[in-house]
Structures are given as structure tokens and as C-alpha cells.
Amino acid sequence: MDVHYDLSGMAIVWDVKKTLANPGKHDGVTFERAARVFFDPFFRLLAAGRKDEERAAIISFDTSGRLLSVLHAEMDGHCIRMVSARRATKEERQGHEHS
């Protein structure tokens, strides 16, 4: 089952099971908060594909100023499926600062 979230006209979905698990696994990062990274004009987009699905990671700040890494896939060009959301690693932070 999926959670369907509309944020400023952008359709975002994620697995309901991950809604409960993600904050505990990733330092309190919720999908609701992570969804806001798509509106940061200074985001950094990285390829993160798999054989069976084209994915990308967006490195960007949430509204509280935390730099996050959000793994996602576009669905049919009109919806984003978030796969995971966590704090950016040291390497991701350095890459974001130098881009």
C-alpha cells in the first residue's frame, strides 16, 4: 500500500511500511519532511539507477536546514516515488558544497 502526498501540486508517493520505519533507521527523517527537498533551487541530482528501474538521488536541504539524500524514481512523468530518505553522508555533503 502506498501513501499519496500532494505538495504544491507535485504528486509524491511512498510505501506505507517505510513511513513507519524510515525515521527510526535514518535519524528521524520522515518522508513528509524529505518531500520538500524537491523545491530547493540548489539541489544536486545524481544518477542512482538499478537494472530494473531508473532512479536518482537528490541531495538538498529540507526546511529545517538538514542536508538530505532522497532516493527516488519518476513514475509516468507525473509522479515521484520516494524510495528512501536520510541525512547526507560526509561525501555527499562535500560534493554538494563544491557543486
Image (cartoon, helix red, strand yellow):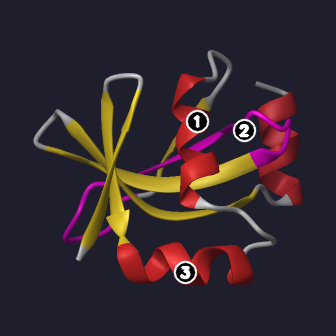
Residue visible at 35% across and 72% down in the picture: 15
Q: Give the answer, above or below, for where 42 lies relative to 82.
A: above
In terms of depth relative to the viewer, which is nearer, 54 or 29? Answer: 29
- Find disc 2 in the rendering and name its residue: 62
* Farthest left residue in view: 76
Q: To which residue does mark 1 refer?
A: 36
Name the chief secondary structure element in magenta: loop
Quote the CA–CA distance across marks 3 and 1: 18 Å
User: Going from the N terminus, do you reach mark 2 or mark 1 first?
Assistant: 1
Report which residue position mark 3 lands on. 20
Q: Is residue 55 magenta?
A: yes
Identify whether 14 is placed above or below 10: below
Q: Which residues are magenta?
A: 49-67
52 sits left or right of 96 in the view: left
User: Looking at the image, do the residues carrying marks 2 and 1 touch, with CB atoms under 8 Å apart?
Assistant: yes
Is 2 located above or below residue 94 in the figure?
Answer: below
Residue 83 tag number: none
Q: Badge 3: how crowded within 10 Å, few (<14), some, or many (20+)?
A: few
The reply to whether the C-beta atoms of the residues labelled 3 and 2 are less than 8 Å apart is no
Q: Tag 1: residue type?
A: Arg
Would you say residue 64 is visible in this rendering? yes
Whole-Å distance between the Cαs marked 3 and 2?
Answer: 19 Å
